[in-house]
Amino acid sequence: METTATQNTGSRIISTLGVGSGVDMVQLASDLSEARFMAQKARLEQQSETLDTRISSAAALRGQLTQLATALGDRVRSGDLAPAATIGNSAVANVSVGSGSAPSGTYSLEVTSLAASQTLASKTYASGAATVGAGTLDINFGTVAGANFTADTSQNTLSIAVTADDTLETLAAKINQAGGPVRAYVATNANGAQLVMKGDEGATGGFTIETTPSGVTRLPGTAARAGELDYLNWQPSSDTGQLKQTAGDAAFLLDGVEMTSGSNTVSGLPGGLSLTLKQTNIGAPTTIGFSDRTANIAGLMSDFVAALNDITGTLREAAAPLGGELGSDPGARALKRAFASMTTAVVMPNAVAGAPNTLGDLGLVLGRDGTFSLDSNRLNATLATDPEGAAAMFTTGIHGVYATFDKLARNTASRKDPGSLAGSEARYNAQSERIEDKLARIAEQQESLRERLTKTFAAADRNVNASQSTLSFLQSQIAVWNADK
């Protein structure tokens, strides 16, 4: 903008004075400096446009691969290919299957007991605002069995510092804020208020209460009273009705095999099965099964083939030997090779002998023209002879259809690999940056040349102006001399 303004200002000055050669020297300098670098700039700008086209084409291909890998993963994880478990009696338990599992068959489930948490209600106080006495309240964790308590040395004692102004309600708040495996609240009824404490599910979630009161003096053998901290003491051997529920493990039979769990939420079972136990069904076992996904596999393969052909269409156009933006690109060639071997590549190296282990086993066919199609007869044969093996190919584990395609998409996105699409993008971007630097230097050189030419032409214009003035004087004198004759 400043250069243009300077040019225009110089032109106006020369024009206004009406002197000089009559040639716009500023414009002439600008035109000559531009013409000097015009061919070089045009060549670099053309190269820059070509690189931009290649970058865009490589990024578009890479984006298509990533989108397909993401969509495939979503469908395997949570879509109609996600493993789904069923249970005959839903009142007994909720069932689910972990991601990456390929369960099959059936299991029988008989729940004999649910996991329970210890619930303890203190002796009665006048109200929740009643003070409880100062000192230290210790909660020890372990197993309560009848009148016996077995400490669990893996769990630390929870110690609560109690002040003289603490009430039943503030003590409950302190227990909750301590972050231990015990929750507390105050329950009030017609008889008064009680501190209710509830531990975690499982047999080792039992607990006792021991206190060390401060400022309490009473005669030997005298029982503690409300307002004295040891009024809250509790041991199973001296329980007088405070224990409302004993902590216990869940127990169930899976295919007749006895199992226990410290929680009603049970994981790590065969086939990736997880249970949330809700009710006992002693003597009436229910059946757990898994939904048939063969029809969904056929639908996914059809969608997968269509998506692959979208990508191959883009690749064929971009990597065409004549006129293709990526005609000689190593990343595009690598992708072509990967697609050429896709139907025969082993995606399940851990499959048992005879089980399906390639996309070709799922009906994927590569035609002579480079497009894919689905051989429904071969797919149906695989689903009929080995439905479990086919289903196992659609998990989020380290092997399978998703893992294989996701690896391909990740490889094309690796900028460290010069033979990948992302590696090509990085190379083209670097070349584009170098061209931008060259264009910037040319712009500086052009401006420098324009300034030099402007100064040179201005000096020449002054000389022409001086010559014209001398010529005009001589012409005037000659005219005077001729008139005198």
Image: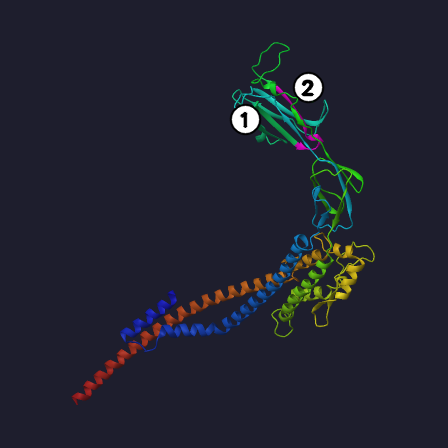
Magenta segment: 200-211
In this rendering, the answer to whether 235 lies above or below 44 is above
Q: Position of residue 301 (x, y in %)?
A: 70, 62
Q: How crowded is mark 1: few (under 14 residues within 10 Å), some or many (20 or more)?
A: many
Q: Where is residue 240 in the image (x, y as percent from the top left)?
A: 66, 20
Q: Residue furthest bottom?
A: 485
Cα separation, mark 1 vs mark 2, equals: 25 Å
Disc nearer the start of the sequence (1/2): 1
Which is more toward the observer, 44 or 342? 342
Three-letter residue code for mark 2: Ser
The image quadrant where one finds the N terminus is bottom left
The image quadrant where one finds the C terminus is bottom left
Dominant SS in magenta:
strand
Q: Is residue 108 left or right of residue 241?
A: right
Snapshot colouring: rainbow
In this rendering, the answer to whether 328 lies above or below 481 is above
Q: Which residue in the protein does label 1 denote? A: 169
In terms of secondary structure, where does tag 1 sit?
helix
Which labelled disc corresponds to residue 238? 2
Whether the residues at callouts 1 and 2 have beta carbons within 8 Å, the answer is: no
The reply to whether residue 84 is in sight is: yes
Which is more toward the observer, 84 or 17? 84
Residue at the image position 59 percent from the left and 21 percent from the top? 124
Q: Quadrant of residue 451?
A: bottom left
Three-letter residue code for mark 1: Glu
Q: How crowded is mark 2: few (under 14 residues within 10 Å), some or many (20 or more)?
A: few
Residue at the image position 67 percent from the left and 52 percent from the top? 77
Q: Where is residue 249 in the image (x, y as percent from the top left)?
A: 72, 33
In terms of secondary structure, where does tag 2 sit?
helix
